[in-house]
Structures are given as structure tokens and as C-alpha cells.
Amino acid sequence: MSEDEAVLKAEREFDLVLFGASSFVGELTAAHLAESAPPGLRVALAGRSRKKLERTRSGLAGTAREWPIVLADSNDDESLAAMAGSTRVVVTTVGPYVKYGLPLVLACAGAGTDYADLTGEPPFMRRSIDAADAIAKDSGARIVHTCGFDSIPSDLGVLALYEAAREAGAGSLGETTLVVTALKGGVSGGTIDSMKVQVDRSKSDPAVRRLAADPYALSPNREAEPDGESERDSTWVGQDPDTGDFVAPFVMAGVNTRVVRRSNALMDWAYGKNLRYRELMKTGSGPVGAVKAGLVVGGLGGLVGGLAFPPTRMLLDRVLPAPGEGPSEESRNKGYFRIRITTTTSSGRRFRCHIEAKGDPGYNATAVMLGQAGLCLALDNQETPGVAGVLTPATAMGGVLTDRLRAAGQVYEVSEIER
């Protein structure tokens, strides 16, 4: 971005616009911003319905009840362009992104406006990269996908391991495994809706199926990556080599692993060309743990298969949450997650990153992650990496975002594992 463009961007009406503020997660994000945004930060709430936005605004704390309202619609390119041109940062919760997201990405990329979302949809991210990366680089925009439970803990956790290994002179990262050791929370209607869209597109489009099967689908230079056979996502029951606990595939591995690999490639493979990354979920020890792992594997396969078959989808639609629905405040407050990521470096030394947060991972904890990502883009330009394009949380904001999340109560702790 040129000096003149930077001046024009600084002179915009708003510092941050939250698009989709009246959605379930949008309201939680608005509440977090109301509590966390510093005085003087110019925040606006955006969406299609003034009435719904006013209702959201009325429930906020303090001066946030005076935040301006911006009307914009994902199906109205002119309104998206006006919104993008009015602010320095857009944070959006409006999905499924593969259906509604690309026009806003293009509007922000063209206007030089930073952007953060909650997508967990690799096909949308690939479209965004192909359509907007060059535009965003020219304008200076940072387009940052996956700024929620998928994929901030994975992306920032591996970054933290890399930084610890580099500081210790321990070499590059090799075998690196994320294990979700504890998790309590509900599944959002928005996530289910995104899964339906991806299932439908995979059924009808062979290119989408190939993309879903490619571990390096989001790489900026696919030819420079391995063939991918050794990086296929886990699909069956296994055992944790460190603890002996039974493990199952982690439901978000399909997006998280690809984001981590994109970060590595965008950083010129700083983590190492021998990085081998996977994600698993602990189910317990002994026969009970083995049975639970089998149930997880069967349940994941059954859910995808059920969504792909019209009669069973009709039945699932009756019991699964719809877009805009979510658990009660009491239930959300009881949620939490704990994650450990372990790596073995090229020198044989081992490091571990422990990550945890209180609150339902897909709701309360995600609202904190998305809100802090937006604040980081708006406030921390002097400390962040200073790159532009279609990025990841690690490459756009790096450890600056990790520090923000720590200050907001989430835990990221790295230690070396003594032999």
C-alpha cells in the first residue's frame, strides 16, 4: 500500500465494522468488542435488517449502545463496496461463506480494507485465494480466513512451537500432532449449514472432491509441496504414542491442517519442508476409550453420509440446529476446550504447546478469537508482520494475536519436553 493509500484508509469513517452483527455468533462478537474495544475506536454494526441490528445494539454495554448501524447485503455488491470503503477493517460472521462470502472478500481486497471471518470451508478459501490474493497484495489488504475455533488454536499453536524451536536453535519442525484432550460445547447451526453446502458441492463437482482430498489444497505453490499421501487426514481409530490413549480423527482437521500448511508455505516453509501435521481427538484409555473412538469415527462418517442422502437429511434437519440457533447462555458458559500440540524437531528435541480456553469453543471462545483478530487488524499494524494478500491468522497477525488472546484469558503455553 502506498503512503497516499494509507492516509486515505486512516481517514475512513470507521475503524472496524462487524458484518452479520445480529447473527448468533455476531451478537456474541459484538458483546466482546463492546467490552474490549478501547475508547475512541470507531466501531459500527452491519447487516441487512436495521431492526435486528438495533436490537443487538440495545443489549450491548456502555457506549457501544451508540455505535452506528450500516446496512449491507451479501447479494448487493454496491452496498458491500460502500461498507468496505467506509472502514479500515471488516469482521464478518455471514456464511456459509462459499455461498455468500466472495463478493465481500473482493470488495475488501479492492478497497484495501482488512478482513476477518469464521469460515471453515476450504473450497471457499481456495476461491478467495485465486480471485483476491493478487488484488489484496496490490491494495495492501489483509484477507484473513478461519479466525475462530477453526483455525486459530491450530495455526497460532504451531507458530508458537516454531518460534520456540527457532529461539532454542533446535532446528525445523517435523512430526507435529495436535490432540484435543478435552472439549465441551455445542455444534452451531451455521457450521451444520456450511457442512450441507460442502456436501452438496462435493456430490455435484469432481473438482471440489479433489480439493477436499488434497492436504495441500490451500498452498500458494502446490507444485513445491509433497504429493500428499503421507499427509492424508486420519480416518480411523489410533493411539497416542505419548500417552497410549485412544484417539479419533478431529472433526475440524480437514480445514485446520490445510491452514497450518498454508502458513508454512506463505512463510517460505519456515517451519520446514519436513513438517508432517495431523490433528486427533482423545477419547480415553482402555476398552472404553477404544469404543468411544470407534463411535466418533462412525458418527462422523454417518453424519456426512446422512447429509448426502436426501431422506436421512430430512430426518437430520429435524434434530440438528438451524442457522441462527445455538445453545443457552448457561450451556455456553459451561463449555471449554483443552489442546496440546507436540512436535519433534530436526535435531530430535521435542516441544509442546498447551492451549485452553473457557466458554463453548464454537460460540463464546470463538467470539473472543474473532473479536481480538478484528482488534489486532485495527490497532496493531506496527507490530504485525506487514504482509498483504489472502492470509492466515499466523501470517497476518502472528504472535501479536497470541498475546491478545492471552490477555483475554486464553492460554498458549510452550515448553520443551525433557527426555
Image (spheres, grey):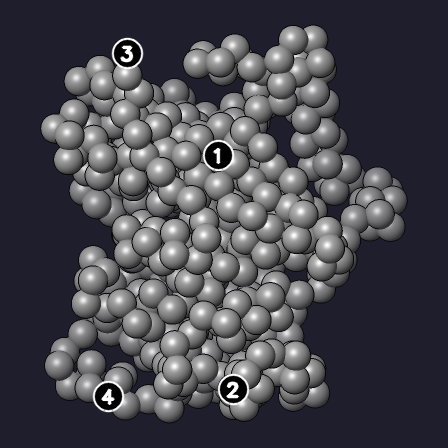
Q: Nearer the viewer, mark 2 or mark 1?
A: 2
Dot 1 corresponds to which residue? Answer: 339
Mark 4: secondary structure: helix
- Apparent side of residue 94 relative to residue 160 in the rendered image (left or right): right
Of the image marks 1 and 4, the number of the one nearer the N terminus? 4
Is residue 283 depicted above or below 107 in this figure? above
Dot 4 corresponds to which residue? Answer: 8
Q: Amino acid at mark 2?
A: Thr
Of the image marks 3 and 2, the number of the one nearer the N terminus? 2
- Note whether residue 134 is visible: no
Of the image marks 2 and 1, the number of the one nearer the N terminus? 2
Circle 4 Cα neighbour tier, 10 Å, few/some/many (<14 / 14–19 / ≥20): few
Q: Position of residue 354 (x, y in %)?
A: 41, 34
Q: Are marks 1 and 3 in contact (CB under 8 Å)?
A: no
Mark 2: secondary structure: helix
Q: Position of residue 272 (x, y in %)?
A: 21, 31
- Note whether residue 408 is visible: yes
Circle 3 Cα neighbour tier, 10 Å, few/some/many (<14 / 14–19 / ≥20): few
Q: CA distance from mark 3 to mark 2?
A: 53 Å
Dot 2 corresponds to which residue? Answer: 63
Q: CA distance from mark 2 to mark 1?
A: 36 Å
Q: Amino acid at mark 3?
A: Arg
Q: Amino acid at mark 1?
A: Ile
Q: CA distance from mark 4 to mark 3?
A: 55 Å
Dot 3 corresponds to which residue? Answer: 419
- Apparent side of residue 68 relative to residue 416 in the rendered image (left or right): right
Q: Nearer the viewer, residue 373 or 407?
A: 407
Of the image marks 2 and 4, the number of the one nearer the N terminus? 4
Is residue 296 depicted above or below 93 in this figure? above
Q: CA distance from mark 1 to mark 4?
A: 42 Å
Of the image marks 4 and 3, the number of the one nearer the N terminus? 4
